[in-house]
Image: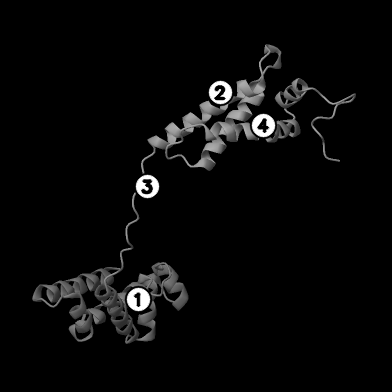
Amino acid sequence: MPVNPTDDTNAQSPEAVLFARAQAGCSATLNYLMARHDGLVQAVVRRQVLGDLPFKEALQAGRIGLWRAILGFDPQRGYAFSTYAWTSIARHIWRAVETYARQEPPLPLSPPVLPDPAVVWEEKAIQQTLAEMVNRLEPRLAYIVTARYGLDGRPPALYWEIGAALGVTRQRVAQLLAIALARLRHPAHSYRLRTLLGRHTVADYEQAAAATARQRKRTRRG
């Protein structure tokens, strides 16, 4: 059965006993006193200058003050609980008003930055062109390039992982990758991609040729 916080073994408890029970940790009695004196909180809130503090937040602050007043009230001192609690409730409301006033106002929401359609188109064109270049390679070379550089959206694979999938050594994977990259760098295959990237200068082609030579040299050493 639900506990009535006003029940006592002999008769209805005086309010002093209720405060003693609440202060001893009886949550049912505490909730009863909170509900019983909630009108006092609303009365105090209506008499305060709240500034920009929302009414609901002022009520919450006042109820915290009421809760502290219940736990700290001593009926033996001879004054009414409403007099004691009024000060505690008002003090917590004042603190909430001051804290709210010190908060920086929220920054105005910036309009969403939409991507440049030209940039979006260019990125898609580059991805599509690169995919077409790789797909024109022999299936094994296309698989190696795709796996090694994560072109399928997966994490880039290591040489030994690719070798295990193809049944070859990691050294052989490195050799095949060098062959694939050399073909992709060739002007006959890379013309469209270089056009999109703006890399059509003599220096760009010389740099590609040098990279191919270095990779072939490393492959032969391996």
Name the residue type under label 3.
Answer: Pro
Which mark is first along the chain, 4 or 3? 4
Horizontal side of residue 14 vs 179, given as left or right: right
Which mark is first along the chain, 2 or 3? 2
Labelled pair 3, 2 in contact (Cβ < 8 Å):
no
The secondary structure type at the circle numbered 3 is: loop
Name the residue type under label 4.
Answer: His
**Which residue is located at x 61 percent, y 24 percent?**
85
Label 3 packing within 10 angstroms: few (<14), some (14-19), many (20+): few
Residue hosting label 1: 145
Between the residue at mark 2 and the residue at mark 1, the CA separation in whole angstroms equals 76 Å
In percent of width and height, residue 76 lies at 71, 13
Label 4 packing within 10 angstroms: few (<14), some (14-19), many (20+): some
Residue situated in front as seen by the camera: 129 or 32: 32
In percent of width and height, residue 203 lies at 10, 73
Name the residue type under label 2.
Answer: Thr
Between tags 3 and 2, which lies in front? 2
In percent of width and height, residue 133 lies at 29, 83
Labelled pair 1, 4 in contact (Cβ < 8 Å):
no
Horizontal side of residue 164 vs 69, given as left or right: left
Between tags 3 and 4, which lies in front? 4
Residue hosting label 3: 106
Name the residue type under label 1.
Answer: Val
**Which residue is located at x 58 percent, y 33 percent?**
43
Between tags 1 and 4, which lies in front? 4
**Which residue is located at x 82 percent, y 36 percent?**
3
Which mark is first along the chain, 2 or 4? 4
Residue hosting label 2: 87
The secondary structure type at the circle numbered 4 is: loop
